[in-house]
Amino acid sequence: MTGQTWPLLVGLAAWLAMAFAYWPTLRLYGQPAVMALLLPLAALLFTLMTLDSARRHWRGRGGAWKGRTYGADAVADG
């Protein structure tokens, strides 16, 4: 195998293993099995939301929900 083929095959195997592991959950909720192939997009979305949350934290803005923001002082007040 060439240097570029090996990582591609490992990534494909990991993607298929992840989709196979998710398949019972899709069956439970009556979703088509092909939806398991979209898991990398869900992971990308989760990563972007996590990075946005970190950015907001670093700026001192805190989390936002329904138009309200919760900063560090809201957590300290409990």
Image: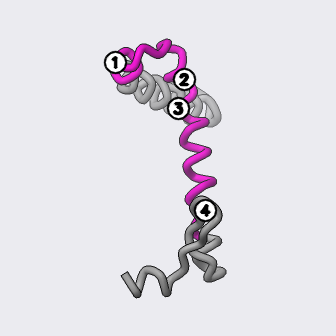
Cα–Cα span, label 1 and label 3: 17 Å
Quarter of the image where the C terminus is located: bottom left
The answer to whether 33 appears left or right of 65 in the picture is: left
Q: Earlier in the sequence, mark 3 or mark 4?
A: 3
Residue at the spot x=53%, y=26% of the render?
A: 12
Density class for disc 2 (Cα within 10 Å; few <14, some 14-19, many ≥20) is some
Residue where numbered disc 1 is placed: 28
Quarter of the image where the N terminus is located: top right
Residue where numbered disc 3 is placed: 39
Residue at the spot x=56%, y=38% of the render?
A: 42
Of residue 65 and residue 6, the one placed in the foreground of this image is 65
Residue 57, position in %: x, y? 58, 76
Secondary element under disc 4, as helix, strand or loop, is: helix
Q: Height in image: 65 above or below 34?
A: below
Residue where numbered disc 4 is placed: 51
Residue type marked 3: Leu
Cα–Cα span, label 3 and label 4: 18 Å
Look at the image and give the residue range highlighted in magenta. 25-54
Residue type marked 4: Leu
Residue type marked 2: Leu
Residue type marked 1: Leu
Question: Which mark's residue is nearer the viewer, 2 or 1?
Answer: 1
Q: Earlier in the sequence, mark 4 or mark 2?
A: 2
The label shown at residue 37 is 2
